[in-house]
Amino acid sequence: MKFKHYIVIAFLCFTVLGIKTEALAQITHEISVMAGPVSFRGDYGLRYDVESNLKNSGLGVGVNHYLYFGCGNCYSNKPLLGPYFNEHFTVRTTISYHSTNKNHYGVWAEKNSQGGLQLRSMFGNASVLEAGTGLEYYLMRIIEFDRRSRALTPYAGVGFNFVYYSPLADTTLEGGLGLPGTTFPTFLAGPGEEPAFTNNPNVTTSINLHVGLKYNYSRKSDLFVEFRWHRYFSDFVDGLRPIGPQNKYDDWMFWLAVGYIFNLEW
């Protein structure tokens, strides 16, 4: 069984747990919005190149929904998985969108050669819509955090997402990508080879890991900042899939997000 199949199973388990909890305990709901810069790591530029990583950046926005089992105004005498789970874990569902314009940077793109011109002339975009769920762990007891004004608590989470992506890969050179005169050899597929670029939307899945810090701003609202990593199970999210042994990884991204949480129950 492939790794992503295990993630699908975990996603279904989280859903079942959420449904089951409705019968066992009163649940507190919160919603939040978040936004921040995204650094998309795909096949534009050079791996570990600072200019490529800094300039191939975009913006992400998201909406979150939280299910809390042990918050201040709804603590249950029927723990779902024991008191520790109720006091430290939440189920978080996220819908997010991010878009990043892409260009080639680095020593190869800077060369005064046909290949350098081909790389400098390429441009693209990765537009990604994700929806998924996961578990989030809080270091401080949630009931304690809710009752302490101006409290701070670190947290960490893991999740699974369904992904719809719409890539763009093109060149300013006359004729477009796909011709020997306009396309760098890495992105020019030969007879019988799979294409090395695409402009077709598609779907895939991803996993995400995130860590953050949450601040109790008021009785009904919190603020947070978090650092997210998304790993996609596709190498075409940015529209490129280079041919050759240098293409070792699928696409992934970093996201630094800040957000505002509103408690629906108080």
Image (spheres, rainbow, N blue to C red):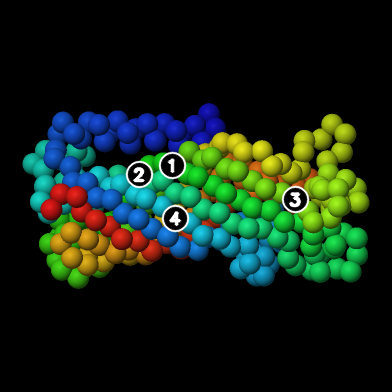
Q: Mark 1: few, some, or many residues within 10 Å (few <14, many ≥20)?
A: some
> Looking at the picture, how far across and down is residue 20, in whole percent?
22, 31
- Mark in front: 2 vs 4: 4
Could you tell me which residue is drawn at 54 percent across and 40 percent down?
164
Residue 134 in sight from this viewpoint: no
- Left or right: 207, with 214 as reference point: right
The Cα–Cα distance between marks 3 and 4, rounded to whole angstroms, is 26 Å
- Mark in front: 1 vs 3: 3
The first of marks 3 and 4 along the sequence is 4
Q: Secondary structure beneath disc 3?
A: strand
The Cα–Cα distance between marks 1 and 3, rounded to whole angstroms, is 28 Å
Q: Mark 2: few, some, or many residues within 10 Å (few <14, many ≥20)?
A: some
Which residue carries the number 3 mark? 170
The quarter holding residue 117 reads bottom right
The three-letter amino acid code for the residue at tag 4 is Val
Residue 1 in sight from this viewpoint: yes
Q: Mark 4: few, some, or many residues within 10 Å (few <14, many ≥20)?
A: many
Which disc, if any, is residue 43?
Answer: none
Could you tell me which residue is drawn at 28 percent across and 51 percent down?
31
User: In the displayed structure, would residue 193 be above or below residue 53?
Assistant: above
Which residue carries the number 1 mark? 131
The Cα–Cα distance between marks 2 and 4, rounded to whole angstroms, is 14 Å
- Mark in front: 4 vs 1: 4
